[in-house]
Amino acid sequence: MTRIWRFGAVSVMNVVITQALLQGCLRFTSMTPVWANIVAVGVSSAPAYLANRRWVWGRQGSHSITREIIPFWTYSFVGLAVSTAAVAAIDHRFTSDLAVSIANIGAFGLLWVAKYFILDQWLFGRLQDDPADEPADAAASSH
């Protein structure tokens, strides 16, 4: 149960970072809402990855590019595509920074539950629970 609460806390942190970046780009630059969303999601994905890996799933040591980083970023970019489509649709209909933020949050909210299970079952949880399934680059660095 602790893992779920920590995942929720990291998700809230990520929403705050994403929204601060999104609103900052919208208010202080000439970026369109779509580009502001791309920048905000792209930048906020890095701290989300690190916090989930370390604090939620307790993973330390080397990062496996093929087993952790690429799958995490792939899922993040699926979220980026969904949220960008939502932002573009809302921006076309309304001219409101608040509506853009709601579209971004709503899109990621739809993907939130699936993300927990993907991280827990395929990325960080499985590797943590099964020492024999440790990434090769982490095993090599411990010798």
Image (cartoon, rainbow, N blue to C red):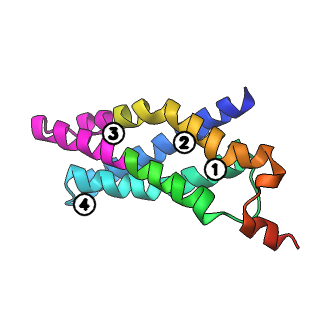
Which of pointers 4 and 2 lies earlier in the amino acid sequence? 2
Residue that carries the numbered disc 3 in the rendered image: 104
| Magenta stretch bounds | 80-103
x, y percentage for residue 49?
58, 53
Horizontal side of 32 relative to 117 (left or right) equals left
Q: Residues within 10 Å of mark 4 (few under 14, many from 20)?
A: few
- Amino acid of disc 1: Ala
Q: Which of the two discs, 1 and 2, sits closer to the camera? A: 1
Which of pointers 1 and 2 lies earlier in the amino acid sequence? 2
- Disc 4 versus disc 2: distance between alpha carbons? 23 Å
Q: Which of the two discs, 4 and 2, sits closer to the camera? A: 2
Residue that carries the numbered disc 1 in the rendered image: 51
Identify the secondary structure beneath mark 3.
helix
Q: Nearer the viewer, residue 5 or 63?
A: 63
Identify the secondary structure beneath mark 1.
helix
Q: Residue furthest toward the front?
A: 132
Which of pointers 3 and 4 lies earlier in the amino acid sequence? 4
